[in-house]
Image (cartoon, rainbow, N blue to C red):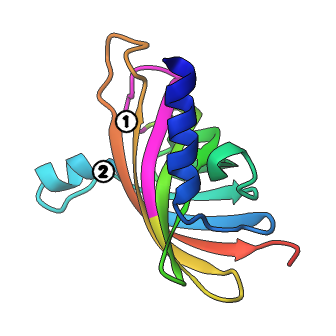
Amino acid sequence: MRRSLLGFLDLALAALPTVAQEGLVLGLGGGIFDTAAWTEDKGDFDALEAGLVLRWPTTWTWGIGPMAGLSATDDGSAWVYFGARRPFRLGSRWQAGPTFAVSYYDQGDGKDLGHEIEFRSGFEISYVRSSGRSLGIEFYHLSNAGLADANPGSNSLWVVYGLPLGR
């Protein structure tokens, strides 16, 4: 059963159009950290967020590629993460796909997420120019997945500019 399920997944993912990324891409991002606070407080959000993400070519099985990054908020929270992404082609210039990473979170003076280990799961949609530069938005969630009694989580919405390196 397990072998047939993996075979089915392999065929299903192989049939979807992938985005061929030729080299390393540096993403520069910024946006709102903890969007739930923003909506609950009617436009008054707790923190702004900025970060960097490196995206390696999508050469792993099923078109998955590694990524690593760091983010910080203007109230002193910071986290580093390593994970994977799976972009799918949407027409000739658009791509979209999920991301997942394991993070180390330092609360600083910011939101208490309950644990130092957090999981970052998100979805990004981007417009990619022929030069390889891209502009996209990503919505993602940080959560400790029950590693601690407190698990409030946080949602972020940010804009990411992708700049190919070594092209």
| Magenta stretch: includes residue 115 | yes
Position of the C terminus, as image quadrant, is bottom right
What is the residue that sits farthest to the right in this orientation? 166
**Helix, strand or loop under label 1:** loop
Q: Position of residue 30 (x, y in %)?
A: 49, 65
Q: Quadrant of residue 19?
A: bottom right
Range of the magenta residues?
A: 110-124
| Mark 1 lies on residue | 111
Residue at the location (69% across, 81% down)?
Answer: 132
Question: On the rendered structure, is 160 left or right of 147?
Answer: right
- The amino acid marked with disc number 1 is Lys
Q: Is residue 63 above or below residue 23?
A: above
Q: Nearer the viewer, residue 152 or 108?
A: 152
**Could you say which disc has been placed on residue 93 in the image?**
none
Is there a contact, CB below 8 Å, between mark 2 and mark 1? yes
**Could you say which disc has been placed on residue 46 in the image?**
2
Question: Nearer the N terminus, badge 2 or badge 1?
Answer: 2
What is the residue that sits farthest to the bottom in this orientation? 130
- The amino acid marked with disc number 2 is Asp
Q: Is residue 107 above or below residue 166?
A: above
**Residue 31 makes an appearance in the image:** no
**Residue 141 makes an appearance in the image:** yes
Residue at the location (54% across, 58% down)?
Answer: 15
Question: On the rendered structure, is 91 left or right of 155?
Answer: right
Q: Residues within 10 Å of mark 2 (few under 14, many from 20)?
A: some
Q: Is residue 31 above or below residue 2?
A: below
Q: Is residue 40 above or below residue 165?
A: above
Question: On the rendered structure, is 57 left or right of 38?
Answer: right
Q: Nearer the viewer, residue 45 or 150?
A: 150
Q: Residues within 10 Å of mark 1 (few under 14, many from 20)?
A: some
Task: Give the Cα distance between marks 2 and 1.
Answer: 9 Å
